[in-house]
Amino acid sequence: MKIAICPGHYPEAAGAVNHRYDLNEHDEACQVVSHLRTLLLAVGHSVHVFRGHLRHKIDRINNGNFDLALDVHFNAGGGHGCEVVYVPHSPTRQAQAAVISSTMCSYMGVRNRGAKEGYWMGGDNPGTKPDAFVSQTNCPAFIPEPIFIDNDSEAEKWLAAGRHAHIAEAISLGIQDAFGA
């Protein structure tokens, strides 16, 4: 497969944070993406990493004839567990996201929050506009959110402990299970 992987956010808008452990979503996602790239290359996939603004990532993916795209994020809001975001109203993508999420959670031993329809949560009408990454890419696209970065116990166990490679393995196994690749 030809796979595009992206770390969520970018340096100037680093996403969610954990103040206790001095972690930000973008930096942590970059580390996971680096490991994920290595794992996917090792099993024979063609892998391209795109960083930067969301529009830039989507344009590069759409111009690259990819089979799959992932935008790795970390959740926030005080919850726990992992989930995978997919394009709304797609039973096929929902089923694939559910497999990725189930595999990730099983491998990591965290709560499975499941497949979630991707809606943009900001602005005047939160939850009404489909998420750009999953809805504007020309290939199947997903946003894996392995843990809540603002949950101190999850951040301590996974990110502060430097277990980025283990998170990448969980995502890679999820892709293999969902796509047979």
Image: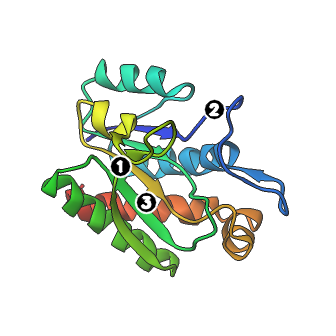
Task: Please report the residue visible at 75 percent of the width from the left and 68 percent of the height from the top.
Answer: 161
Q: In the image, what residue type sits under mark 1?
A: Gly
Q: Earlier in the sequence, mark 2 or mark 1?
A: 2
In the rendered image, residue 105, in percent from the top left (x then y), is placed at 44, 74
Q: In the image, what residue type sits under mark 3?
A: Ile
Q: Dot 1: few (<14), some (14–19), or many (≥20) neighbours within 10 Å?
A: many
In which quadrant of the rendered image does the N terminus lie? top left
Name the residue carrying label 3. Answer: 171
Task: Please report the residue visible at 51 percent of the width from the left and 81 percent of the height from the top.
Answer: 109
Q: Earlier in the sequence, mark 3 or mark 1?
A: 1
- Residue 10's tag is 2
From the viewer's perspective, is 90 left or right of 11? left
Task: Please report the residue visible at 42 percent of the width from the left and 69 percent of the height from the top.
Answer: 104
Name the residue carrying label 1. Answer: 118
Nearest to the eye among marks 2 and 3: give it.
2
Q: Is residue 128 visible?
A: yes
